[in-house]
Image (cartoon, rainbow, N blue to C red):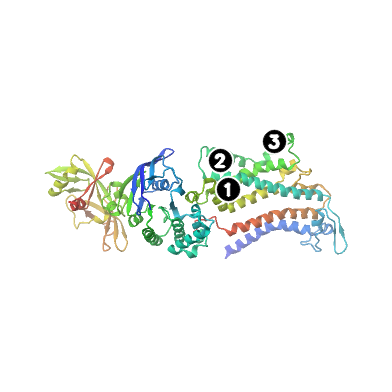
Amino acid sequence: MAKINLQDIYKKYDKTMALNGLNLQIEDKEIVVFLGPSGCGKTTTLDCIAGINQPTSGRIYFDDKDVTDQAPHKRNVSMVFQSALLYPHLTGRENIRMSLRIGRNSRQVEDRKIEEVVNLLSIRTLLDKLPYQMSGGERQRVATAKAIVRNPSVFLMDEPFASLDAAMKEELRVEVVVLQKKLGITMIFVTHDQVEAMTMGDHIAVIKEGILQQVGTPNEIYNMPANVFVGGFVGSPSMNFFQVNVKKCDNNYIFEHPKFHIELSKKLTEYFGKFLEEKKSVIIGLRPQHVTFLEKPEQGVLKGQIYAVERLGKETRVTVDYGGKDKLKAIMSSLFNKTMGDVVYTLPKVEDLYFFDSEKERKLLFKLDQTLNGK
Amino acid sequence: MNKKIVKWILIIVIIFWTIMPLYWFLRMAFMNPAELSLFPPHFYPHKPTISGFFNVLGFSYTSSSGEIFIPSGQADQIRRGLMNSLVLASIVTCITLIVTVPLAYTFGRLKFQHKNKLLFAILLSVALPPVSLLIPFFILFVKAGLTGNLIGLTLVHLTITIPFVAWMLMGFFRNLPPVEPLATIDGFSRIATFFKIIIPMSKVGIAVAAIISFLFSWNEYDFAMVLVNGTPATTLPASISGFLFQHPEVEHLAASVIYSLVPPFIVAYLLQKHITEMNITNPIGG
């Protein structure tokens, strides 16, 4: 039950900057997911919020109270660590009890609180087991019980599902979200798994190299990625990018790529000309599901050879080698009938494209359908 | 099929290799001097007697047939040696643990400046063959008045056990799961984390460290021969060697060797139970 405010957090390890001026506001009772590749600073941020780690500079506020210099146990945070870490020499019950020692409760009060979480998470059979006797999912439940038994104001989870199999992950993901809504605890969840981030987060904070890239709802992150990194990191398979030159011809904009070119219609040029003025080149992004293959070759379309076909049942993933730096990734229906080595033709549709600045930290310029809907 | 046979033959050979010398001494300890001098030797004592075990501790023994076995001339030394060895090995074990557990934890899990250089210093002292220091230690200890007493020998043993055990424990601590942040969240201070979490978690590693330092000190022979043999501070291995230079009392020698095996057996047995009762080597599970 706390609002968290991070102000200008810098963290320096020896020579590397782990966090580079992080500003973030986390609302009460919501789940915020820190998403980013490993080593991006998301765990460091979490450790700073927990108080295990001290920021080099910057302040951390819980409900407008400065907690930067407070010891972890005074902040009333609780944390589930990577792979649901527990004390290996203690039973489930003793592990949970460890969380209560700072409360200085009587034994009876402790037992009652343990009883509550045991019922909540149905872990009665695990109380007398040692961590190594539990399965990954069971350990996860005990670690969660250990974290919430203290009735924390902030609940932190650091890649807790990392070592679980896919089915268990899905089950626990739902469980944790339901639990969080039931208890109304502010929760921060760290992961590098975008599916976890999209399904669990009320808001997602995408972090890269210690810099916050974007904060938004899962929809915002997916549909309006702030830059090339976010666009490429969220979504699987990831977005296709092309660097294209911008040409103006008869008042219409043309995007020229060595392999293909796309024309912006007159009407769209009127709308979006302002974004493109004085731009020599832009980066265009295309999600794999928006790729369509043409029946026959036309002037100025992208020609490529199928490099790989992966059939997933509900869809078919196709990788196309068009002679560029990267390969084009496409999602087709399960009926897709071409095979490796076949030649295909495609031309991105303008309304599916994301336009990013090719300099200026590669910020999103606009996306046609979103902007049109907004008007 | 063939593989299985080879495997079993190897197992039998190894068991034989290990057990046979022990058995040879065991059977000698139960024979009387007449039987011992027979050739070819008996594979087992035909008229077993436990006289050696009494004689070697300085008691005479009368067999059921009225035969009297008189105490060994070495009994005094053996008794002293047994006592001294127990005291010495216990003290060495305690000091080694008190020094190495915090030391190994610090090096194994904490980050600080010049760590690698200091680590190298520890490794270097493990790499040095102890025997190469025999003469320097002897000269030094003669001048310092540390020969002929247990203090000197304790010091020497510690110079060997501490770096070795520290090195071993470092690896153990390094492989423990990272519970320190968990303990911090639970409100443990750094010192409390060490005493209340790390040490209970590390029972097994510490037990093994204790066995190693106890057995080392109990078995150590070279330094004991040079520094304390023939004095009231003699240790068991040194005093047993006394039999080699006397009128042969083979059954007494064998009995004292069997005695010298008992404490290590007890120590290993007690601590081994500890090791099996908790599976800490794989705390994350599999």
State the separation of the CA atoms marked 3 and 1.
Answer: 29 Å
State the separation of the CA atoms marked 2 and 3.
Answer: 25 Å
Q: Considering the numbered disc 2 on the image, is that residue within a helix, a strand or a loop?
A: helix
In the image, what residue type sits under mark 3?
Pro
In the image, what residue type sits under mark 2?
Leu
Whether residue A40 appears in this view of the structure is: no
Q: Considering the numbered disc 1 on the image, is that residue within a helix, a strand or a loop?
A: helix
Q: Considering the numbered disc 3 on the image, is that residue within a helix, a strand or a loop?
A: helix
Residue at 27% in and 57% down: A331
How crowded pointer 1 is (Cα within 10 Å; few <14, some 14-19, many 20+) is rated as many
The mark total stands at: 3
Q: Residue A353 carries which label?
A: none
In the rendered image, residue B131, in percent from the top left (x then y), is placed at 68, 41
- For disc 3, the chain is B
Whether residue A50 appears in this view of the structure is: yes
How crowded pointer 2 is (Cα within 10 Å; few <14, some 14-19, many 20+) is rated as some
Return the residue nearer the eye: A360 or A101.
A101
- For the residues bearing labels 2 and 3, Cβ distance under 8 angstroms: no
Label whose residue precedes the other's in the sequence (3 or 1): 3
Return the residue nearer the eye: A282 or B22.
A282
In the image, what residue type sits under mark 1?
Leu
Q: Quick check: do tags 2 and 3 share a chain?
A: yes
- For the residues bearing labels 3 and 1, Cβ distance under 8 angstroms: no
Residue of label 1: B169
Label whose residue precedes the other's in the sequence (1 or 2): 2
Residue of label 2: B119
Label whose residue precedes the other's in the sequence (2 or 3): 2
- For disc 2, the chain is B
Return the residue nearer the eye: B272 or A263.
B272
Residue of label 3: B136
